[in-house]
Image (tube, rainbow, N blue to C red):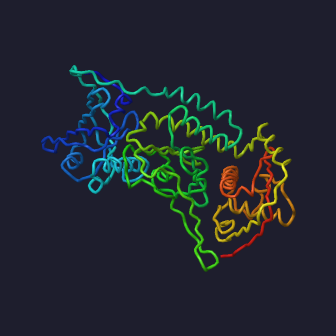
Amino acid sequence: MSAVDLAEVRPCLEGAIPAIMATTAADGTPNVAYISQVYYVDQDHVALSFQFFNKTRQNLLAHPRSTLLVLNPINAVFYRLHLRYLRTETEGPVFESMKAQLAGIASHTGMAEVFRLLGSDIHEVVELERLPQEPLAEALPAPAPRPNPLVVLRRGSARLSAARSLGAALEATLDTLEKELGVRHAMLLILDGATQRLYTVASRGYATSGVGSEIALGDGVIGVAARERTPVRIGHMTSAYRYSRAMRDSLLGDGSAAASTDIPYPGLPEPHSQLAVPLLAADRVNGVLFVESPVDMQFSFEDEDVLVALGGQLGMAIDLMQEAEAPCTEEELEGAAAAAATPLAAGPVLRVRRYRSNDSVFVNNTYLIKGVAGAILWKLLQDRQRQGRSEFTNRELRLDASLRLPDVADNLEARLLLLHRRLAEQCPQLRIHKTGRGCFRFEALGPVELEDIAA
């Protein structure tokens, strides 16, 4: 037997093979039981799922020492962990991550109604052993080669450092996921601090982009990751944390019919693996990076570590780009100049309706956008109609009290990016072009009729 580091044991804690736990009662009577979930907390601690008040639980409360046997499914090596029970957590990052993972394990094994997490038992790892390995009759197949995490991070960092706008930073992150990790389905969401909802600003691999779709804090793996500021990873199909659509509020129109503000959520209909990572900066959540796959056990703890590192860089980049308002690239300036030189063809009349209650904007009775982005669009339309304006600056938007931007972390760049992409997808007759550092042009291809409704 030889001493090892807990990092070596992390492949054993993916939920593929149940662990075996031995405890003793106060009188010394031993008890052995299977444990559904062992969760890596840090290099000195693990958390075990507390699901039933059974003999194991009673023994732990009476005598906090236990022994855990885990197996690496890749090379069939056993490890023995000597543990000391410290406490039980019923809320917080560890509990929520374990709850999500257990829901996946339960669904995979057909035990969704039985497996319910009551708490996360935190244990200190007092001693760790690698047990002698018996020679195998046949060699185990070598695991599929994986990309080097440091190489992935280096290339991802290079892409992010070259980005000169928020949109470019988001696309650089998605490029890294797709090209370096082979992730085919991913999305990025930004947190609106005022509404405490996350809205999709970029995605990759879906039939529709879902830009503008919203998720509330605490809903599914994405909402839990943002609320608890912790990664949440699921390796099996689970209905408890699955989305088939974004849950959106509705509002009444003119009283005669319901006007829906539902933007379809772009997620897979039946994901088997999901991983959500919060985008943190200065101890504040800026958004969430989310990936998923139709394959079981697609994302490992190594993938989680890589995404956490990339997410930290992107979180800081979001903050810096809000403050810096980087000047346009030459390509962007050339594109804006070409667009300005192109004659605007007269299109059909656009009938734009705004509901003041939540700044929802509809174009020809079709929902477009709401919230701060909706208020910005309405301002641009009004200024264009009343003053004939087409040139605007980020600074004037920040100083406009009617937009109700928060004093701290207003995410104006993200809101403008969201508006730009929604217009490009749903209403190309209205368009925004960045023309320089912190300034842009707003254009309409045809006449516009405005209707403001107080309800």
In the depicted view, which residue is nearer to us: 303 or 293?
A: 293
Which is nearer the eye, 128 or 232?
Answer: 232
**Residue drawn at the location 24% of the way across and 39% of the way down:** 65
Residue furthest to the bottom in view is 256
Question: Which residue shows up at 24% across the image and 53% down it?
Answer: 52
Q: Is residue 363 above or below residue 136?
A: below
Q: Is residue 187 above or below residue 347?
A: above
Q: Position of residue 33 (x, y in %)?
A: 19, 43
Asked whether residue 321 appears in the rendered view, the answer is yes
Dividing the image into 4 quarters, which one contains the N terminus?
A: top left
Residue 423 position in % (x across, y down): 69, 56
- Tell me what residue is drawn at x 55 percent, y 66 percent: 249
In the image, is residue 104 above or below residue 172? below
Please tell me in which quadrant of the rendered image residue 280 appears.
Answer: top right
Q: Is residue 247 left or right of residue 351?
A: left
Q: Position of residue 360 (x, y in %)?
A: 65, 66
